[in-house]
Structures are given as C-alpha cells and as structure tokens.
Image (cartoon, rainbow, N blue to C red):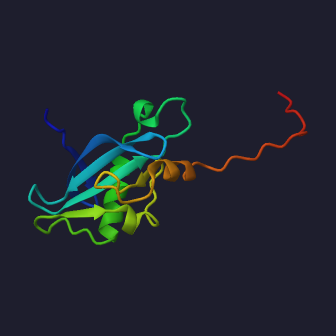
Amino acid sequence: MRTRLRRLWTDGRVFVWRAEIQDVSGSTDCHRCVRVRVWGAGKTSRALQADLLSTTWGTPWPPCLVDGAYPASADVRAVVDYALRHGWQPEQRGGTFVLSEREHADGFRLPGFLLTDRLRGPDGGDPTTRVVQAQPARAPYRSGAEPCDT
C-alpha cells in the first residue's frame, strides 16, 4: 500500500510529510504513537522525524485500541517550526534529523502529544508514566462540600 504524502506550506516553503500510526507498550498499557517524517527539499534531502506519543488516557480499554489521535497540518507545522529553530537544515542531503525525547522533550510542546524514543528502541521514559503525568491536574475531591445548584 502506498503511503500518502501531504503538502505543507510555511514561510514560503513547501514541505511534504507523512504520518504512520503505530503503537508502543508502556508498563501497564499500549499507547498510540505516530511517526511523522517531513522533507523540505526533495526526496534526497535531510528528513525530519518525530515520534509523537498520544496523551489520550482514561478509557476503560487500552488507549492504543481506541485512540484516534492523529496530527493535523497545524501540528506538523509546529513540529517543523520547532525543528528549524533547533538545527534542522532540510536543504542538506541525506540523513535524518530526529526530534528525540532525550534531547527535545523538555522544550517541545504540542497539545495531545509528547515526543518518545520508544519506537526507535527501549530507551526513553515509560510511555504509561509519561502519559499519566501529562494529564491535567484535577481539583481534589472535598467531602462536605456544598451541593451545586443546577
């Protein structure tokens, strides 16, 4: 089956990209992971690669089975912009510029996704732990609170 290449225009440049859905195992669950690859100067140019771990959590089923997370064009644009600011030179020939968890996770922000190194090998943080930690803090339950008027 052919992989669909999509086009993205940013700052007067044309990039082509593809996204491949995979899953990665965590300590207690499997999680959706999307490998994004981007080229900015033809098929022999230096590719950009980012493995995006979905932060979907809180379903009664394993997240990798029910997660529908997929990066939109705006998400890929954010990945490209971040990579360009951090050293990706798409006009160079050959090789791959990887946005790794180890080097970029602290500074990279994309709603709904985290960078992961787990698709490339066993290195990197546990996906389940990282996804749980990425969940927004909930207000603590207070017993004896006044009931809501609805």
In the image, residue 117 sits, relative to residue 27, either above or below, namely below
User: At x 14% / y 60%, what residue is drawn?
Assistant: 41
Q: Position of residue 130 (x, y in %)?
A: 50, 53
Q: Is residue 104 visible?
A: yes
**Along the line of sight, which residue is nearer the eye, 23 or 82?**
23
**Along the line of sight, which residue is nearer the eye, 105 or 31?**
31
Number of numbered labels in the structure image: 0
Q: Position of residue 137 (x, y in %)?
A: 65, 50
Q: Position of residue 92 (x, y in %)?
A: 14, 69
Q: Is residue 43 left or right of residue 140?
A: left
User: At x 24% / y 52%, what residue is drawn?
Assistant: 37
Q: Is residue 71 visible?
A: no
Quadrant placement of the N terminus: top left
**Along the line of sight, which residue is nearer the eye, 47 or 123?**
123
Looking at the rendering, which quadrant does residue 32 occupy? top left
User: At x 11% / y 57%, what residue is drawn?
Assistant: 42
In the image, residue 87 sits, relative to residue 143, either above or below, namely below
Quadrant placement of the C terminus: top right
Q: Is residue 38 left or right of residue 59?
A: left
Q: Position of residue 73 (x, y in %)?
A: 33, 46
Outermost residue on the bottom side: it is 87
